[in-house]
Image (tube, rainbow, N blue to C red):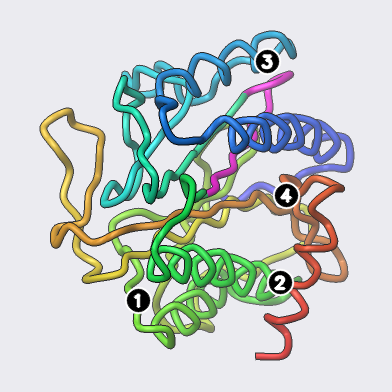
Amino acid sequence: MIVRRSTGEIDKLRRVNQLVARILAQLRAMAVPGATTRELDAAAEAQVRAAGAEPAFKGYHGYPATLCTSVNEQVVHGIPSTRRFVQGDVLSIDMGAQLDGYFGDCAVTVPIGQVSSEAATLLRVTEEGLFRGIDAVKPGARVSDIGAAVQQHVEAHGFSVVREFVGHGIGTSLHEEPQIANYGPGGRGPRLSRGMVLAIEPMVNVGQAAVKVLSDGWTAVTRDGSLSAHFEHTVVVTDEGCEILTLLEADAARAQGLLDAAVRT
């Protein structure tokens, strides 16, 4: 069942998603050569709890950390460790929190120092793909229109969309209906309507789309060892389109540019 949230519920969802976005912005500044994903994880948990919230991922099906930190060929669900970043790494930070019974979820992939032109292009195209998916969110559209928009953009640039992991509804549970694939034909699935809250999160590989999960039971990596990137925003369907709940005011102008580009192409 897909839930349509009330104005009061959306206010609570906006609050927790803004919290996640603010913490992610601080973590991005910490992601420099010599730092570790475990240091980022400790900082994230401390900030979540200081805000009166709870980490959404820690303990979820046994996951051991506040963040999912995936480096280079790691696609998603990388467990924080003592591995130190080196110049040229790319780091995906995925974070969720629960506050007053509602969940927030957001992810970003960041360069560590100066990265290769291929890595920089991967990050740009993946984030653009996210915003093309967001641009497809409007009342009356179909769920699959989101993934169709993502796939078209990503594959036009020669990259691959991961199939095994998808976006999802979110609200009083971290994962709710509907599932939101980042690929496939448009015009299928449930129609979107005001009050639906969706976590849209394309995962994109430089090489082939295939992934595998490591022996830790969590970390998914590209089978061919190529770089991967992951971006995620949580949005709510409005009368006119959607509101990005995880978008900070400081990033609004940049996001508008990405949305405007999505409309033009």
Q: Which residues are magenta?
A: 98-108
Eyeballing the image, is 42 above or below 231?
above
Q: In the rendered image, which residue does mark 3 sit on? A: 53
Eyeballing the image, is 160 above or below 9?
below
Find numbered disc 3 in the image and state the secondary structure of the residue it sits on.
loop
What amino acid is found at the position of numbered circle 4 in the picture?
Arg
Q: How many marks?
A: 4
Residue 44: name its quadrant. top right
Residue 51 appears at what percent x and percent y? 74, 14
Q: In the rendered image, which residue does mark 2 sit on? A: 258
In the rendered structure, which disc, 2 or 3, sits on the residue that comes first in sequence?
Answer: 3
Q: In the rendered image, which residue does mark 4 sit on? A: 4
Q: Residue furthest left?
A: 215
Which is more toward the observer, 84 or 94? 84
Task: Please rate how many residues cluster around mark 4, counting C-alpha atoms within 10 Å: few if below 14, some from 14 to 19, many from 20.
Answer: some
In the rendered structure, which disc, 4 or 3, sits on the residue that comes first in sequence?
Answer: 4
Residue 37 appears at what percent x and percent y? 41, 27
Task: Please rate how many residues cluster around mark 3, counting C-alpha atoms within 10 Å: few if below 14, some from 14 to 19, many from 20.
Answer: many
Left of 226 or right of it: where is 77? right
What amino acid is found at the position of numbered circle 2 in the picture?
Leu
Q: In the rendered image, which residue does mark 1 sit on? A: 159
Q: Nearer the viewer, mark 4 or mark 2?
A: 2
Which is more toward the observer, 102 or 46? 46
Left of 133 or right of it: where is 242? right
What amino acid is found at the position of numbered circle 3 in the picture?
Ala
Find numbered disc 4 in the image and state the secondary structure of the residue it sits on.
loop
Q: CA distance from mark 4 to mark 3?
A: 23 Å
Q: CA distance from mark 1 to mark 4?
A: 34 Å
Q: Nearer the viewer, mark 2 or mark 3?
A: 2
- At 31% from the left and 19% from the top, the residue drawn is 62
In the rendered structure, which disc, 2 or 1, sits on the residue that comes first in sequence?
Answer: 1
